[in-house]
Amino acid sequence: MSSVPQYLTGDKQGIKAFLDKFDVFLFDCDGVLWSGDHVFPGTVETLSLLRSRHKQIVFVTNNSTKSRADYKKKLDSLGIPASVEEIFGSSYSAAVYISRILQPPPHKRKVFVLGESGIEAELDSEGIPHLGGSDPAYRRDITPADYQAIAARDASMVDPEVGTVLVGLDHHVNYLKLALAYHYITGPNQATFLATNTDSTLPSAGALFPGAGSISAPLIMMLGGPGREPLSLGKPSQAMMDAIEGKFRFDRKRACMVGDRMNTDITFGIEGGLGGTLAVLTGVASRRDVVEGEVRPMAFVDRLSDLLAGEVE
Amino acid sequence: MSSVPQYLTGDKQGIKAFLDKFDVFLFDCDGVLWSGDHVFPGTVETLSLLRSRHKQIVFVTNNSTKSRADYKKKLDSLGIPASVEEIFGSSYSAAVYISRILQPPPHKRKVFVLGESGIEAELDSEGIPHLGGSDPAYRRDITPADYQAIAARDASMVDPEVGTVLVGLDHHVNYLKLALAYHYITGPNQATFLATNTDSTLPSAGALFPGAGSISAPLIMMLGGPGREPLSLGKPSQAMMDAIEGKFRFDRKRACMVGDRMNTDITFGIEGGLGGTLAVLTGVASRRDVVEGEVRPMAFVDRLSDLLAGEVE
């Protein structure tokens, strides 16, 4: 049974005490700092307050189409000061996992990508060779010759050094790329099946569109369904938390996850054994979700900027 | 507990008695009559034998990319005599289901197709208006304007008369079509989600490639996963058996399903309450699958042409 989350809005002493408990704040972004292209009032000031108290800030995003550098540009365009080093995206998380945990042997060193340039940039940053992805050579119909070449594992079509298939959001997903990904996973190298994240949908323009998880779905079904899911390197997978901790080297008990979704952000913090979780009501979760739901944060505020009341006078 | 299937190869009297039990033979094709482009020896003669005994023959195929007329051409090219009326494919099955069972009201009369020209031809044959499918207008990248138009249900992009989404194998599946299919299913019309068939893979050139089921998979995941699968109109779905019976009007007890796959063909016949099921060992199932598997046919032969021993002298 979860306990009742502490309501911090308007509770100046409560906020001060809460902030004092943590050295690191991990932020989900959309729904917390902004919505779409609209930055919530007080977002910049709240981040400033935390920085002035020497808190480490980490922007944690499941957006796999953007590299950290791309995401920094987005933050810049929204007027939110940030450094590339503070950004941790699911594509970077995947690249770090491959280079530092998987450490594929030379004959399996390449990654076949179903995804976009953000993934490629992060693989490059870790020195990981890759193919597929945004390469226009794969943006075409499958041909009879392709069937033959794939089945025969002809080197013109199937690279024998692929040891990993990494799937993120791909607006150019097609039959040829899915066929190749399946053949790498089931081929002689038994390529490791990874996903930047498993969000099935993605909000845009006030509606839902296919998310990265839906790009993995055909492969999961082809492989036999439940139990054949990829390892996810995005929230709420703890593989992402491990990667974040590996990079920032903090005490989990002195870290707090801030988010608007109970089943991704807050679950991510709780399962990661963080010292705290903080929900905001400016995104997906309602007050009722936060107070009565199955997954509950340690504390919540109506909006992030309510934390400004904790400023030292 | 299933009983032991009767082994008919070489059992002349057994074959005669078996054939006498049935007026109708439903045939799975690939793995039974041919493999790839190779017709098994004796296929034509065996079909002739059945016809000479006034048996009704139905070629039952889950191949959704071909209309009955297309499939007839394939049979012609393989040298197998057949009439269009003897062919029952999953696309035709879906078209019949929509026109005769669903009978959508006028404001939901259109079908959004994720699939190819075979589906379109069969919808046309039943007089069902459709969009999507092979229309080159949908073979393009999604644009920022598309997101807005889809979210706003702008009539330039979203047809308010779509009441059914039909998914088959689509070698031109893309992000835009998946986004539209999702919006029709979740939109104000709550479009009925149908699939021609749910085979996750498709054999070709000796390897496996994405099947029709894998085209539905992203939508199932976006809709919330298990429990949100489409109604399938292909084997082993009984919706297909109902459609076959509706067309040929036979006594199920006098019908026999012939196939090489226990979990699709033989299950299809058993669940349909057919009088008999006959397995062949020229396709997917091994002798052990047939004799010791969970799903077992009434009888089996090594190859279809073994039935020729039952010819009246």
Image: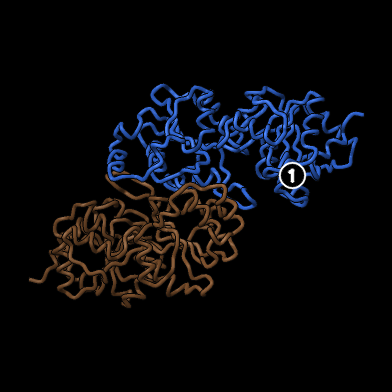
Chain colours: A brown, B blue
In this image, A113 relative to A291: left or right? right
The foreground one among B210 and A223 is B210
Q: Residue reaching furthest right?
A: B313
Q: Residue type at mark 1: give it.
A: Arg
Q: Residues within 10 Å of mark 1 (few under 14, many from 20)?
A: many
Mark 1: secondary structure: loop
- How many numbered markers are drawn? 1
The foreground one among B239 and B52 is B52
Residue B241 appears in the picture as rendered: no
For the point 46% across and 45% down, the residue is: B220
In this image, A88 relative to B310: left or right? left
Q: Residue reaching furthest left?
A: A313
Image quarter of the C terminus of chain B: top right
* Residue A60 horizontal/vertical position (percent): 30, 64
Residue A225 appears in the picture as rendered: yes
Which residue is denoted by mark 1 in the rendering? B296
In this image, A38 relative to A227: left or right? left
For the point 62% across and 38% down, the residue is: B235
In this image, A52 relative to B83: left or right? left
* Residue A177 horizontal/vertical position (percent): 48, 53
Pinpoint the chain carrying mark 1: B
Above or below, comparing residue B120 to residue A309 in the picture: above
For the point 33% across and 35% down, the residue is: B157
* Residue A152 horizontal/vertical position (percent): 61, 57
* Residue B104 horizontal/vertical position (percent): 45, 24
